[in-house]
């Protein structure tokens, strides 16, 4: 069907290419100029999104307070909290009768809080009854730890309103429209460049693919904007990378661009579906055992029915399409490895994950896919450390696995050949170093601005658009755009690491760390392997390499990063509290009405609230002296802003005056603060 469509549109492509054929020098002039325009557009698109990501401030969410003796109120900033005497815990109670890690206070998706004792010496009680397991604790109930009575207190309606207002104030908005306009221009100029380079040989499906992808970008942003989302930095970066991906496929495999476009569409659907699925923590936890079974079946099917490609049996043919099951298992691997705070304190909490990881690594070893095995192993180390904190045990695991890797290098022929070529590719230019030598030559020939899309020669080398995509981008698009693409992937990881400090659940924190570690490590293996700095392992570059399964998996991993973004209305993956006062009272907080009915009006914030807030913030204690001081200033500033907003709340005129004074003075609070 695609072939018939290409035949019918051939006259149109001849007419379009005829413009450049009539003026032979026009293509040369166009390429010479547009190379610089591409760099300017790329810097604007990626730079605008990255700057917004790195400047983004994730405001804390206050879910309640733990009232301590002496009118001290410790804010509850997470769904999962550790209570104890240790300074690193979430809710710090500085009393000698309290254990270092005394218990956990966990909120579920319905808004119910549960307390569990962590085998503390003095034990715990809820309303005078000893705690022997997860115990429901309601607002106003008394929690006794170490002989000290504490009270779980909800935020008042005014505090909830302030919470939403401050989160909206500090949550950076990133409107995608300017970036989408730049991206559309980028794609249009790319299509013209491909016509100038390829002429009538370029199938019309290439132009259609760019058009349909451009429409899908605008449609996605319009749909999400209609749902209230206000931050699109991650999607903008990925749209840029996917545009480069289509340009790469148009150069190296024009006939396969429709398949790649379908993979991008399926990846976007998977991304939206996973974001929606991750909104419910219970749902995310329940699917893990199903994913274990599905992953085992996929790997077994790969072993039995897979076909070999350069020593690795990692492809399964489904009709005319090739599928790489191990890529899809990466998503399941992170789902299964992530855990909630309660699970971290369970004995042998790593048993299921370790068993699954051993099976995955064993299956990949049987398939001789040691590049993917290395990615799984590094991801396993990251997750295992986050779940256990036992660095010594991980060193032992690395040592044992390192010894096993040395044996593989010694006795498995194709691995031995690759390691023999490592750092000596120029000594074997027509043997083991064939691809790397030509890749480095192509990257050098492209210079800073490239030869122009479609004007290179490296796309004729085997695996140029998959395992060696970085030299291909460097040749045709220039070193600047190639480095910018890699930097954008690293920026996604930096934002994920910054945003997890205020993650609602440990599950999302571990998942985001694991996903970003996987993406960055895989990118390093691809880029550095193609340049003979790392051993050449034959792994893809996320979002850029040609391959449907790789593209699908990359979009799935992006959903974990999006779930860690807790900025106000920043992500479909995170439920946000509406700024409607009635909804604020009703959503997931049915106990608060009972609390206020029993205890009367909402409590007032004490005068020393800002000091308590600053001292009890768990992250301030973990930073260096300079960063701790800066963080404390930010927290105090937020608290003062809350107090200012509370003072302005009764009057619309006073709120307007507060906003004007803040704008005029350039300060986040009012002029009279």
Image (cartoon, grey):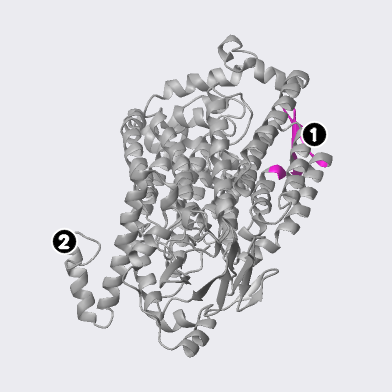
User: Going by the image, does 338 lie left or right of 579?
Assistant: right
**Residue identifier under label 2:** 665
**Residue depicted at 33% across the width and 65% down the height:** 610
Residue farthest along the top direction in this orientation: 427
- Residue 3 visible, this angle: no
Could you say which is closer to the camera, residue 165 or residue 271? Answer: 165
* Residue 212 location (% of width, % of height): 50, 54
Position of residue 175 relative to residue 547, above or below, is below
Inspect the magenta stretch and tell me whether residue 324 lies in it.
yes
**Residue depicted at 71% across the width and 49% down the height:** 350
| Cα–Cα gap, marks 2 and 1 | 66 Å
**Residue depicted at 41% across the width and 71% down the height:** 70
Kindly state the secondary structure of the residue where label 2 is placed.
helix
Which is closer to the viewer, label 2 or label 1?
2
* Residue 161 location (% of width, % of height): 37, 76
Q: Give the quadrant of residue 309.
A: top right
Inspect the magenta stretch and tell me whether residue 546 lies in it.
no
* Residue 663 location (% of width, % of height): 19, 63
Earlier residue among tags 2 and 1: 1
Position of residue 363 relative to residue 413, above or below, is below
> Which portion, as a residue range, is magenta?
305-326
Kindly state the secondary structure of the residue where label 1 is placed.
helix
**Residue identifier under label 1:** 366
* Residue 597 location (% of width, % of height): 48, 90
Q: What is the quadrant of the C terminus in the image?
A: bottom left
């Amino acid at each position: 069907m695609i072939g018939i469509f290409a035949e019918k549109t051939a006259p149109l492509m001849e007419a379009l290419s005829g413009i450049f054929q009539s003026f032979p020098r026009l293509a040369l002039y166009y390429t010479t100029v547009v190379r610089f325009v591409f760099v300017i557009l790329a810097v604007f698109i990626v730079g605008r999104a990255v700057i917004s990501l790195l400047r983004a401030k994730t405001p804390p969410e206050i879910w309640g307070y733990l009232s301590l003796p002496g009118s001290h109120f410790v804010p509850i900033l997470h769904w999962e909290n550790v209570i104890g005497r240790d300074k690193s815990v979430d809710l710090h109670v500085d009393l000698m009768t309290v254990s270092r890690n005394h218990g956990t206070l966990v909120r579920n998706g319905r808004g119910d809080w549960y307390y569990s004792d962590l085998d503390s010496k003095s034990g715990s009680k809820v309303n005078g009854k000893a705690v022997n397991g997860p115990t429901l604790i309601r607002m106003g109930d008394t929690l006794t730890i170490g002989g000290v009575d504490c009270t779980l207190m909800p935020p008042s309606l005014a505090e909830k309103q302030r919470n939403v207002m401050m989160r909206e104030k500090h949550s950076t908005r990133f409107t995608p429209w300017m970036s989408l306009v730049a991206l559309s221009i980028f794609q249009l100029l790319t299509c013209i460049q491909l016509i100038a380079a390829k002429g009538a040989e370029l199938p019309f499906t290439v132009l259609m693919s760019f058009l349909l992808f451009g429409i899908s970008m605008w449609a996605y942003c319009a749909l999400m904007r209609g749902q209230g989302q206000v931050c699109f930095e991650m999607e903008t970066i990925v749209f840029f990378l996917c545009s480069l991906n289509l340009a790469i496929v148009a150069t190296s495999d024009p006939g396969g661009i429709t398949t790649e476009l379908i993979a991008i569409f399926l990846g976007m659907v998977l991304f939206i579906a996973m974001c929606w699925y991750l909104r419910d923590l219970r749902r995310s936890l329940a699917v893990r055992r199903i994913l274990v079974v599905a992953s085992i079946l996929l790997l077994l099917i790969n072993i039995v029915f897979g076909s070999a490609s350069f020593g690795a049996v990692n492809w399964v043919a489904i009709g005319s399409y090739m599928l790489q099951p191990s890529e899809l298992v990466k998503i399941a691997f992170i789902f299964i490895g992530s855990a909630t705070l309660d699970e971290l304190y369970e004995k042998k909490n790593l048993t299921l994950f370790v068993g699954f990881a051993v099976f995955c690594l064993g299956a990949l070893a049987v398939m001789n896919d040691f590049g993917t095995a290395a990615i799984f192993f590094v991801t396993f180390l990251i997750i295992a450390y986050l779940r256990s904190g036992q660095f010594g045990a991980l060193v032992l695991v690395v040592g044992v696995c390192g010894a096993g890797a040395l044996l593989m290098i010694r006795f498995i022929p194709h691995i031995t050949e690759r390691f023999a070529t490592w750092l000596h590719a120029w000594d074997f230019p027509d043997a083991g170093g064939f691809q790397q030598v030509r890749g480095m030559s192509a990257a050098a020939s492209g210079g800073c601005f490239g030869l122009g899309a479609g004007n290179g020669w490296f796309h004729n080398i085997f695996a140029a658009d998959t395992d060696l995509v970085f030299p291909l981008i460097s040749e045709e698009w220039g070193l600047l755009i190639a480095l910018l693409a890699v930097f954008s992937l690293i920026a996604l990881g930096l934002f994920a690491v910054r945003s997890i400090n205020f993650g609602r659940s440990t599950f999302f924190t571990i998942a985001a760390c694991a996903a970003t570690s996987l993406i960055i490590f895989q990118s390093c293996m691809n880029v550095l392997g193609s340049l003979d700095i790392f051993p050449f392992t034959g792994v893809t570059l996320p979002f850029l390499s040609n391959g449907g399964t790789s593209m699908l998996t990359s979009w799935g991993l992006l959903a974990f990063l999006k779930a860690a973004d807790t900025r106000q209305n920043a992500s479909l993956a995170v439920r946000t509290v509406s700024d409607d006062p009635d909804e604020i009272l009703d959503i997931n907080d049915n106990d608060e009405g009972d609390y206020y009915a029993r205890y009367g009006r909402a409590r007032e914030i004490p005068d020393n609230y800002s000091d308590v807030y600053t001292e009890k913030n768990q992250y301030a204690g973990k930073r260096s002296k300079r960063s701790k001081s800066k963080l404390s200033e930010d927290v105090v500033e937020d608290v003062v802003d809350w107090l200012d907003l509370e003072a302005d709340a009764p009057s619309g005129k006073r709120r307007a005056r507060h906003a004007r004074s803040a704008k005029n003075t350039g300060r986040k609070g009012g002029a009279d603060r």
